[in-house]
């Protein structure tokens, strides 16, 4: 059935259903094993490999360069559907899609050609940016240096989400002259050690743990200055989180409706002899679905704003691009608290529609709250509200990029 048939609303384009049908059978298989993987802490390596072969990683690469040529709204909607199947996988691929976005923002040249070809044939990238401990906001401890006739990378990163499943790792580091740089190293380089030590209570299968680089080989052609990355990066990465949350909402709506329809037990003081006929229970189910619907609609609106920023990049109008980027960041920030609240509320009231047996671990409904809560903790919504308020009152433009670590002040 189409997205319209299932009452989730029209897709973002006339061709969306054709694009989505390419992946929906795979999404269905992924969803069927989601709870079992969660309970057994089984990483979705096989599922990600299947998606790679199907071309999911090349969604944003133009058709002329071997990809599927998806717009950002189309990508966002696909990610909502994937997240409804298993939100771990979307987050594991978040770094890859951010890397691809950087590639499609490049002008024609050898770097774009090289990376577009790699992505089109199914290669994916993980990420290694965050440092913990005594890490600082304004400089990376991870550095490149010369060793003999080679350029090598040394350092330790955490939250290297998806790198365990990747062919390449996109790394934020400090250059030879102390400048901020971005580079890529092969995942299978002997100097790269990716460790599955992520111990968060949610998004447990994203492999968001530690990566250690010990004299990992760096191709000088794959080193760029940090400032050269695509401008709407913060908004884009948040869009992926928002799409993931909306997908979690959709999964909750579907699972709750199915559980209520199948439930035979009821309470003596209930408003119906069966849950499926109890108006109070139906109200809860309706609220969960409505929250998920609203979250998805908001995500597509945000994606349109970011698409405009992408298009402005190629319009040769610096002022228009600056404005489009600011609006994209603001629209994203305006969505964060609302989408987060909608999905977190749904993940709590889901248990009001069912009995105490719904809290049993084998059913796995708790994963939705754990996953949504973990995702929404990455980029605190309180800061987003402040940024929006500062713009509304004072006209202050939003920050485009930010980092976590000790303040230099």
Image (cartoon, grey):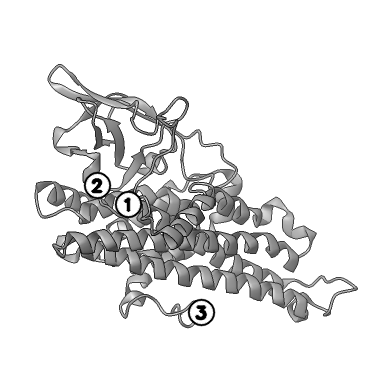
The 10 Å Cα crowd at callout 2, few under 14, some 14 to 19, many 20 or more, is some
Q: Which mark is residue 233?
A: 1
Q: In the rendered structure, find residue 181 and report the number of the disc placed on it.
A: none
Front-most of 397 and 222? 397
Q: Residue at x 48, y 48 (%)?
A: 379
Residue 105 at what x, y percent from top left?
Answer: 21, 55
| Mark 1 crowd level (few <14, some 14–19, many ≥20, 10 Å Cα) | many
Mark 2 or mark 3: which is in front?
Answer: 2
Tell me how far mark 2 sits from mark 1, CA to CA: 8 Å
- Are circles 2 and 1 on residues that touch, CB within 8 Å? yes
Instruction: Inspect this view and state whether residue 66 appears.
Output: no
Cα distance in 3D space between marks 3 and 1: 32 Å
Q: Which residue is mark 3?
A: 6
Q: Which mark is residue 229?
A: 2
User: Residue at coordinates 24% horizontally, 43% vertically from top-left?
Assistant: 227
Quarter assignment of residue 154: top left
């Amino acid at each position: 059935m189409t997205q319209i048939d299932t009452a989730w609303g029209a897709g973002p384009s006339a061709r969306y259903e054709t694009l989505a049908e390419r992946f929906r059978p795979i999404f269905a298989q992924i969803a069927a094993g989601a709870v079992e993987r969660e309970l057994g802490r089984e990483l979705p390596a096989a599922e990600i490999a299947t998606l790679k072969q199907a071309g999911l990683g090349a969604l944003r690469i133009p058709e002329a360069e071997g990809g599927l040529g998806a717009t950002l709204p189309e990508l966002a909607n696909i990610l909502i559907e994937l997240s409804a199947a298993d939100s771990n996988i979307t987050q594991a691929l978040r770094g890859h899609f951010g890397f691809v976005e950087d590639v499609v923002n490049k002008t024609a040249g050898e770097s774009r050609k090289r990376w577009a070809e790699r992505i089109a044939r199914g290669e994916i990238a993980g990420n290694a940016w965050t440092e913990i401990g005594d890490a600082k906001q304004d400089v990376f401890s991870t550095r490149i240096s010369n060793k003999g006739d080679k350029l090598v990378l040394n350092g330790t990163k955490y939250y290297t989400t998806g790198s365990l499943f990747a062919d390449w790792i996109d790394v934020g580091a400090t250059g030879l002259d102390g400048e901020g740089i971005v580079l890529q190293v092969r995942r299978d380089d002997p100097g790269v050690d990716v460790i599955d030590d992520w111990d968060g209570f949610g998004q447990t299968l994203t492999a968001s743990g530690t990566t250690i680089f010990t004299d990992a080989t760096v191709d000088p052609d794959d080193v760029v200055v940090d400032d050269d990355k695509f401008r709407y990066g913060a908004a884009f990465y948040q869009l992926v989180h928002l799409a993931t949350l909306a997908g979690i909402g959709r999964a909750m709506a579907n699972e709750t409706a199915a559980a209520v329809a199948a439930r035979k037990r009821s309470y003596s003081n209930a408003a119906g002899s069966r849950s499926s006929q109890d108006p109070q229970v139906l109200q809860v189910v309706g609220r969960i679905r409505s929250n998920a619907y609203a979250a998805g609609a908001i995500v597509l609106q945000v994606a349109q704003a970011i698409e405009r920023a992408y298009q402005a990049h190629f319009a040769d109008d610096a002022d228009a691009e600056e404005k489009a980027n600011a609006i994209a960041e603001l629209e994203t920030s305006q969505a964060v608290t609302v989408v987060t609240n909608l999905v977190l509320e749904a993940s709590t009231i889901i248990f009001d529609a069912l009995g105490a047996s719904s809290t049993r671990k084998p059913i796995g409904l708790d994963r939705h709250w754990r996953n949504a809560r973990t995702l929404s903790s990455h980029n605190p919504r309180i800061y987003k509200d402040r940024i929006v308020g500062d713009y509304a009152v004072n006209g202050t433009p939003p920050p485009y990029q930010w980092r976590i670590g000790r303040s230099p002040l």
